[in-house]
């Protein structure tokens, strides 16, 4: 009797001492969340000696691997056969998983392989070394195209004998690593239509943040398509965010008009960013979030000099996380491509209208100067107005495109 | 989200027009009762064939051509591709030089670029400041191996009418003996907007589209003068006398035929009333907005006027303005918020960055080109819509200039 299962290995959360139970429960929740909309319901997931076991009898392995490779906290995924702990069953299972892995190679290609057995259950009479030899010899007999190579194998047949059962597998996939979403608390992501902010959001999610996103709309200074972009970006992030992401759309046109009417042109971008931070902070208070995540970088544009970032950041009391600060633009683009947001960001509709970009933006604004300019703004009313006019969307990748 | 408005002004007919109810009914009929395949031998096929034949007569009538000279296609882009590639590939040994203009639709300019990569030389004539190409320039650029001249009749961004008749005469004079270069005319924006009676005498090929005048999208036509050999783009069942394989788009063709029929019947009224609206629009905009500029000819075509052919004029449905200090795309969205729909440059190219290739070729400086919008009228346009547009425009330009001129 053999059964198809998925071995789900997790990393850092294994090290979390007393909190380990909490992390593991959270990860199970995230795994279930990623599988929640399957037609047959969530398959059972079992926790066994330092990993999870997912029943693959009702879901194709490829589908499960595809979905779970976007769950932070997972470091590896191995579709395996679970069998009785006896030599014959292990040999048969090894032949089967090897046969499947061989499909990845041309039929006339000699394949280097090895067996890596682990006998964790010492009641089993054959030790790891002997298992390698016995099973390896059996596989060599069954497949003439195999060559043993312990150092540079193309296929490694892994065999584990544990107290709860025995497993064989030959294909493994990497998970995204990181921590389960929600294990580090909740933050607000400032989501524009650009390349950077979704990548920053992904980095925050990776480190266990739960996120709600906020997008500032400036119709008619921008196209309705700019807003569609933000919605599509939030949807693209949602599989990484536990299957669903909340997006708040805040009207920003009034604020832009007020800044433009009352304040010096060269401070326009600085003041706009400060207003966005204030609105994000007010939103954080209402949804119980405790930090802001932005796509800001250091030195890419005038508003991202050290002086600008510092003055902008002081508009809020909240911790501001800028996870991209250590990355080059090309690295950010590579990341955006990897997580599937680049093509959406690259659509040609700008989210921050060039109308509001001053010809000579201040690169070294001072807090005193900015506060003097802001004294002409009734900013608490603007913040309240934007919050009152917000529209909230719950986005999942399963939803049909709008 | 733009607020819901009760009254709207749709002034983007050069991009597309709402489908006329009669055309919609013809489409519905051809999709339900008359669903047959024109190639079928039974009476269902005959009925469908009759619908296509009737539409072909309408198209032929529009330019006084023979119905056999009309090929139905999927739209203006396919017609332009089929005309240019089809005629050149039909005669591979006859020359390697093609003349066109710098203000053509992308479906001509992109084909021209393809031709260059295949070894053709392409001359792109620049227009004058009002968006009109001079026939004399064409003559100057003709070479012994010039095989095709492709020129649009009405420019889609500024409305300027090109001197196609004069170009045709020039080509004949330049080659008194022997074959003259083929003349292809992109008439997509001209059909139903200006008289086309003489077109089949001048042109060897002419492109049309269905959805610009109240027909459905996805259907167009190409006039191919009898005797012109065309190498088809698609291999297949040999429909459309072997020139365009694929089961005929009977519903689309039925809708286009009906829309063209109606547009032709309305043409005299269109020329009069739409022409007046265009004149009114230009006068009001230029007088009520400081620094407003008209791109393209101020005169609207008036076939009754003596000397009409000698001055640059525009089709009655397109007008293009610049409002320095009001970026075109932002102005478009401000008007949208008031329920007014216009375009920046051409709909096909306005998603690309950078100014319009047409305005650039006309010598409009970048600051002016960036702040341009195109207003285009159609079969639904009313004087009330023009007034609605004017009042929204005055407010929006003033509002935007507060931000940009300080």
Image (cartoon, helix red, strand yellow):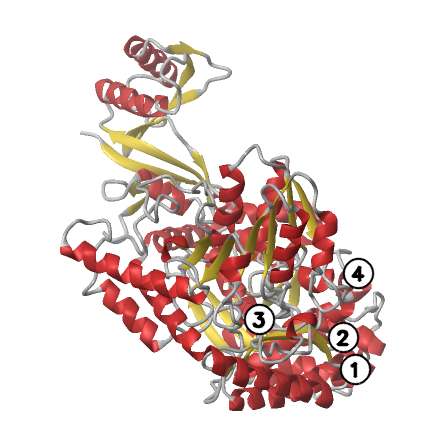
Q: Nearer the viewer, mark 3 or mark 2?
A: 3
Give the side of residue A357 with respect to residue A277, left or right: right
Q: CA distance from mark 4 to mark 2?
A: 15 Å
Q: Could you say which quadrant of the image residue B319 lies in?
A: bottom right
Labels 1 and 3 share a subunit: yes
Whether the residues at callouts 4 and 1 have beta carbons within 8 Å, the answer is no
Foreground: disc 4 or disc 2: 2
Q: Residues within 10 Å of mark 2 (few under 14, many from 20)?
A: many
State the residue at coordinates (48%, 56%). Answer: A236
Residue A223's tag is 3
- Mark 1 and mark 3 lie on one chain; the one further toward the N terminus is 3
Q: Which mark is residue A268?
A: 2
Q: Position of residue B3 (x, y in %)?
A: 50, 84
Q: Give the percent coordinates (x, y) of residue A163.
A: 29, 32
Chain letter of mark 4 equals A
> Foreground: A165 or A91?
A91
The correct choice, above or below, for B1 with respect to A324 in the image is below
Dot in front, 4 or 1: 1
Q: Give the label, 1 or 3, closer to the camera.
A: 3
Answer yes or no: do the residues labelled 4 and 2 have beta carbons within 8 Å? no
Residue B168 to residue B33: above or below: above
The mark that comes first in sequence, 4 or 3, is 3
In this rendering, position of residue B114 left or right of residue A271: left
Q: Are marks 4 and 3 in contact (CB under 8 Å)?
A: no
Q: Position of residue A387 (x, y in %)?
A: 55, 81
């Amino acid at each position: 009797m053999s059964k198809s299962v998925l071995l789900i290995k997790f990393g850092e959360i294994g090290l979390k001492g007393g909190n380990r139970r909490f992390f593991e429960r959270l990860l199970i929740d995230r795994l279930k969340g990623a599988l929640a909309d399957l037609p047959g319901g969530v398959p059972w997931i079992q926790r066994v000696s330092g990993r999870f076991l997912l029943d693959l009898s009702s879901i194709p392995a490829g589908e499960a691997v595809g979905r779970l490779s976007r769950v932070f906290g997972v470091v590896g995924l191995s579709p395996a056969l679970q069998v009785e702990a006896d030599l014959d069953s292990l040999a048969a299972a090894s032949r089967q998983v090897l046969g499947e892995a061989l499909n990845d190679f041309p039929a006339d290609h000699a394949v280097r392989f090895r067996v890596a057995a682990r006998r964790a259950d010492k009641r089993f009479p054959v030790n790891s070394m002997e298992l390698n030899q016995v099973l390896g010899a059996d596989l060599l007999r069954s497949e003439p195209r195999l060559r043993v190579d312990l150092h540079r194998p193309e296929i490694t047949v892994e065999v584990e004998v544990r107290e709860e059962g025995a497993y064989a597998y030959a294909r493994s996939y990497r998970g995204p690593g990181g921590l389960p979403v929600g294990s580090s608390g909740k933050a607000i992501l400032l989501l524009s239509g650009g390349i950077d902010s979704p990548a920053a959001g992904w980095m925050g999610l990776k480190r266990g943040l739960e996120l709600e996103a906020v997008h500032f709309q400036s119709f008619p200074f921008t196209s309705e398509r700019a807003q569609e972009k933000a919605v599509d970006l939030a949807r693209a992030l949602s599989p990484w965010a536990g299957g669903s992401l909340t997006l708040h759309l805040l009207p920003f046109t009034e604020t832009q008009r007020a800044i433009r009417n009352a304040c010096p042109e060269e401070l326009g971008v600085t003041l706009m960013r400060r207003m966005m931070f204030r609105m994000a902070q007010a939103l954080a208070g209402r949804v119980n979030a405790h930090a802001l995540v932005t796509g800001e970088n250091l030195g890419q544009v005038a508003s991202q000099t050290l002086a600008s970032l510092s003055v902008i950041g002081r508009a809020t009391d909240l911790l501001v996380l800028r996870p991209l600060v250590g990355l080059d633009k090309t690295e950010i683009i590579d990341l955006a491509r990897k997580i599937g947001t680049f093509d959406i960001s690259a659509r040609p509709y700008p989210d921050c209208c060039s109308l509001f970009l001053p010809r000579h933006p201040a690169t070294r604004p001072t807090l005193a100067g900015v506060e003097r300019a802001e004294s002409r703004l009734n900013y608490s009313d603007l913040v309240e107005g934007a919050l009152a006019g917000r529209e909230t969307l719950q986005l999942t990748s399963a939803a049909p495109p709008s | 989200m733009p607020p819901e408005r009760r009254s709207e002004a749709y002034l983007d007919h050069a991009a597309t027009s709402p489908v006329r109810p009669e055309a919609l009914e013809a489409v519905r009929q051809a999709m339900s009762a008359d669903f047959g395949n024109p190639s079928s031998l039974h009476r269902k096929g005959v009925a469908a064939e009759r619908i296509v034949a009737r539409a072909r007569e309408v198209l032929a009538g529009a330019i006084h051509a023979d119905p056999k000279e009309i090929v139905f296609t999927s739209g203006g882009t396919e017609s332009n591709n089929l005309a240019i590639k089809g005629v050149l590939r039909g005669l591979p040994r006859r020359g390697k030089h093609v003349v066109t203009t710098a203000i053509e639709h992308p479906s001509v300019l992109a084909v021209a670029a393809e031709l260059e990569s295949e070894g053709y030389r392409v001359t792109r004539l620049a227009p004058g400041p009002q968006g009109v190409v001079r026939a004399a320039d064409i003559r100057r650029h003709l070479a012994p191996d010039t095989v095709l001249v492709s020129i649009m009749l009405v420019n889609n961004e500024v409305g300027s009418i090109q001197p196609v008749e004069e170009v045709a005469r020039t080509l004949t004079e330049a080659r008194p003996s022997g074959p003259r270069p083929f003349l292809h005319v992109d008439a997509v924006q001209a059909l139903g907007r200006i008289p086309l009676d003489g077109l089949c005498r001048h042109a060897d090929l002419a492109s049309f589209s269905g959805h610009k005048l109240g027909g459905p999208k996805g259907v167009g036509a190409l006039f191919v003068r009898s005797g012109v050999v065309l190498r088809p783009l698609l291999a297949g069942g040999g429909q459309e006398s072997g020139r365009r394989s694929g089961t005929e788009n009977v519903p689309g063709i039925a809708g286009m035929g009906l829309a063209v029929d109606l547009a032709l019947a309305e043409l005299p009224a269109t020329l009069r009333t739409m022409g007046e609206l265009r004149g009114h629009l230009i006068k009001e905009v230029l007088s009520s907005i400081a620094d407003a500029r008209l791109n393209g000819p101020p005169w609207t075509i008036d076939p009754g006027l003596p000397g009409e052919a000698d001055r640059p004029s525009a089709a009655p449905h397109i007008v293009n303005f610049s409002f320095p200090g009001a970026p075109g795309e932002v102005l478009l969205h401000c008007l949208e918020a008031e329920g007014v729909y216009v375009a920046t440059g051409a709909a096909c190219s306005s998603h690309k960055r950078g100014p319009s290739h047409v305005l650039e070729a006309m010598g409009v400086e970048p600051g002016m080109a960036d702040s341009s919008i195109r207003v285009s009228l159609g079969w639904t346009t009313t004087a009330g819509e023009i007034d609605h547009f004017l009042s929204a425009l005055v407010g929006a330009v003033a509002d935007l200039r507060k931000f940009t001129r300080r």
